[in-house]
Image (cartoon, rainbow, N blue to C red):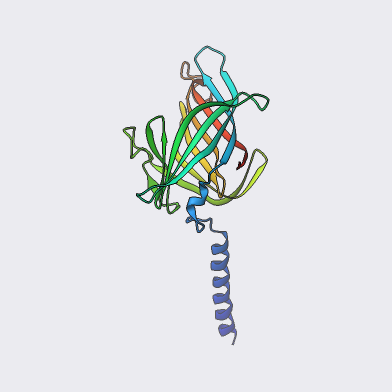
Amino acid sequence: MASSTFRILTKSGIFTLLLLAACTTPETVETVQESAYFPMEAGRFRLYDVIEERFTPNETPVRSLYQEKEQIIRLEQLADGSMQAVLSRSRRQNSSESWIDQETIVLEKWPDRLVLTEKNQKFIPLVFPIDASTIWNANRLNSRQETKNRYTDIGISNTINGLFFEKTIRVVQQDDSTAIDRTLRAARYALNVGLVEEEQTVLQYCQRTTDCIGQGIIESGSRRIRRLVASGQD
């Protein structure tokens, strides 16, 4: 009887451990409608705070703060089956100033990808389905260097600029760090909102003396961060 009881408890314990493991494993495949991570509706807008920093040897870093707004001004279903959205991108220094138009960008939504046309260059910011094992070249439609974009942090909640988002995904294009440089190109999208955070950082650290190597002292480079502050539909 004791031996039989032990076998039952052991099987029960294994089942419990497997159940716990299943509950604590992070998502690797998104189960919602993936295209909702970049919703395309006429009048939809997103407003961002932007921080730009430029570093030059032996000079004081230059820091710029301003706001950007992206809004869908035209939406069209094309004959090839894709959905095309034309967005206006505008800029202002702060909330007390008027918006100044900067450029127009075009988005095409396909069943398996999102294509962005900006400054006459095509990029692929998102592919579907959203899966942690997926790797894609965001520059496949242009002549730039090949990238290896990947999804991380799939389906997790996030708070950005005090705004809570129940489900987000992160796209990492490059995340390299050494004693002499730092490169980070990444973006985060929220379900039913779109892009909520983006960082483009390319820094070179001090190498002039052995004392400064590995200390993270910025010598040159740039950093640009966009974070959502508001979104909606006009």
Residue with the most extreme left position: 143
* Residue 24 spot, x, y in % from top left: 57, 59
Up-down: is 3 above or below 56?
Answer: below
* Residue 225 spot, x, y in % from top left: 55, 31
Residue with the most extreme top position: 58
The C terminus, quarter of image? top right
227 with respect to 221 (left or right):
right
Up-down: is 226 above or below 168?
Answer: above
Up-down: is 158 above or below 17?
Answer: above
Residue drawn at x 43%, y 54% as measured from the top left: 129
Identify which residue, 204 or 106, lies in the foreground.
106
Residue with the most extreme bottom position: 1
Residue drawn at x 59%, y 27% as measured from the top left: 99
Residue drawn at x 56%, y 27% as measured from the top left: 91
The N terminus, quarter of image? bottom right
Res. 174 visible in picture: no
Identify which residue, 69 or 187, lies in the foreground.
69
122 with respect to 69 (left or right):
left
Numbered disc total = 0
Res. 1 visible in picture: yes
* Residue 117 spot, x, y in % from top left: 41, 36
Find residue 136 and report its image quarter.
top left
Up-down: is 126 above or below 217?
Answer: below
